[in-house]
Amino acid sequence: PQVDYEVPPLPERMEYRNFDELDGEQKKIHLEEFRSHKDAATKHFRFKQKNMDLHSLRCSAKLKLMQAKKFMDFQEIFFPYNVDFRGRAYPVPPHLSIVGSDLCRALLMFAHPKPLGPNGLYWLKVHLANLAGADKMSFDGRANFADENMKSIRAAVDDPFGEDRWWMNLDDPFQGLATCHEIVNAIDSGDPESYMCSLPVHMDGSCNGLQHYAALGRDKVGGKAVNLCIADKPQDVYIGVMHEVIRRVALDAEEMLDFDENKIDLTKQEKEQLKRVKSARLVNGLIDRGVVKRTVMTSVYGVTYIGARNQIKEKIEEKLEEKGNDIDEMEAEINLACGYLAALTMEVMGQLFIGARQTMNWLTECARLISALGQPVAFISPIGVPVVQPYRQKRPFTVVTLLQNIVLTNDSDTLPLHRSRQVSAFPPNYVHSLDSSHMLLTAVEMKKRGLYFSAVHDSYWTHPCDIEEMNVILRECFIDLYNIPLLEDLKKMWELRYPSITFPEVPARGDLDLNDVRSAPYFFQ
């Protein structure tokens, strides 16, 4: 049944009163009434928005299912792709595709099944553990995870809405349910090696943006943190950042204030200290891997302070709600605390990944010099895609009609450059061009070997029986890509194109051995 949130009533409009004519006590009462009215109105519109969001999600799910029903009887379907200005590939269909939600990915399978072979069932179990969020253990540990939960896996297949709803608590429940079906069907077939399976198994990069930065600068410390080096178990970059953030928050939360926080004439320094300590005390004990994960992932792709704050806010609000707090009443405090946590997380990232920061700073400085000439930042990607950053100062203008006013935007290439965006967007765009090059090189090699392949950026998919061969291919393609002196070639290209600019020297390389990637089991996992 469809269940919406109960929307609190919208408070009646406040009676107008001239604030200047009120005495001190009346002003205080009036301010309290105004704050109470504002909080009640905010709460009303927040819950109204939540119901609108739920309606949007229902419509989206119905569209996806409708598309799936239309195509379910076709023997095979094909997805047209667009390549954006960086070389990244995206399916064109807006509702049902592999870049869609968990539901979309669960509905789509390879058109041509292949027998599982000797190790296919093993990789299906690993895949299920990954979908359950149990991806911080060895591959054998993940396969054991599936074996230990076999009773729940069978319950999910036999009666998904029964008493045992284990599958609903997975990180990706619908993909998990689809995998449960394949595992049970393979085992019950009596001959799992001969079982014909169409379900794609995924191998995902470990914080892939940082992997590319570590390879560019041969950063051994950074490379070890993101699984470019040989290790017995997967390294978790998010855990390292989390521990350092927790340590710093705890120190701030324990800090004793040497002034009265309720006094009216606080200095600017005292106000900043009070905000920091209050924010730390609010989030202390709430920080886990999930809180920092998205910010760490997107930091190398140029996430802004506002973006990082909103990412963290989602997780912190969930945790505060679980503890019985009214997040609507605490909105201002939550915003302040999440801003504090976002700044702290980004600061920790910069200090832990010095090699990546040096490369990022070099790319930023080069982009600043180019845009200062009034030129868009342009380069050729490793696979030959000409990349020109499209950021211009768009000029909106209004067309007035009898019925309405329509705002149109002129985004012509003749408009002046948006210099700040040209500079800030270049490092993430360059890394996106590298991950797309790696993906397309892998796709070409898979095609040459007659293997089925699909990918969502740094998540590579193939049949369970072909996972081991794909793992070899994607490592070889990565090593071949970074055996090219990419930054040196980029600098030479720019020096020919902009002879009037003196570009800074490429940052010195570290001592990471790229050949270790061949034997690094958790490079993609």
Image (cartoon, rainbow, N blue to C red):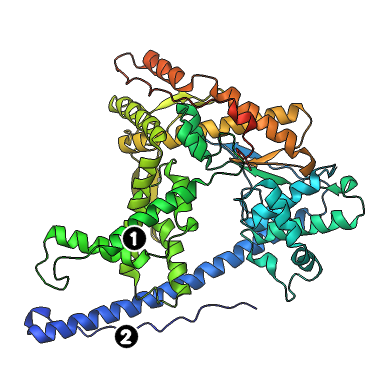
Q: Is residue 213 shown above or below 20?
A: above
Query: The residue under label 1 is which amino acid type?
Result: Ala
Q: Which residue lies furthest to the front in this view?
A: 232
Write down the residue under mark 2: 12
Q: Is residue 450 shown above or below 202?
A: above
Discs 2/1, front: 1
Q: Is residue 259 shown above or below 299?
A: below
Mark 2 vs 1, N-terminal side: 2
The local secondary structure at tag 1 comes to helix
Write down the residue under mark 1: 250
Drawn side of residue 29 relative to residue 158, left or right: left
Q: Residues within 10 Å of mark 2 (few under 14, many from 20)?
A: few
Q: Which residue is drawn at 40% across and 46% down?
A: 303
Viewer-proximal residue among 252 and 494: 252
* Residue 148 image point, x, y percent: 74, 61
Query: The residue under label 2 is which amino acid type?
Result: Glu
Q: In which quarter of the image is residue 342?
A: bottom left
Q: How crowded is mark 1: few (under 14 residues within 10 Å), some or many (20 or more)?
A: some
Asked if one can make out residue 1 in the rendered structure from this viewpoint, the answer is: yes
User: Which quadrant is home to the N terminus?
Assistant: bottom right
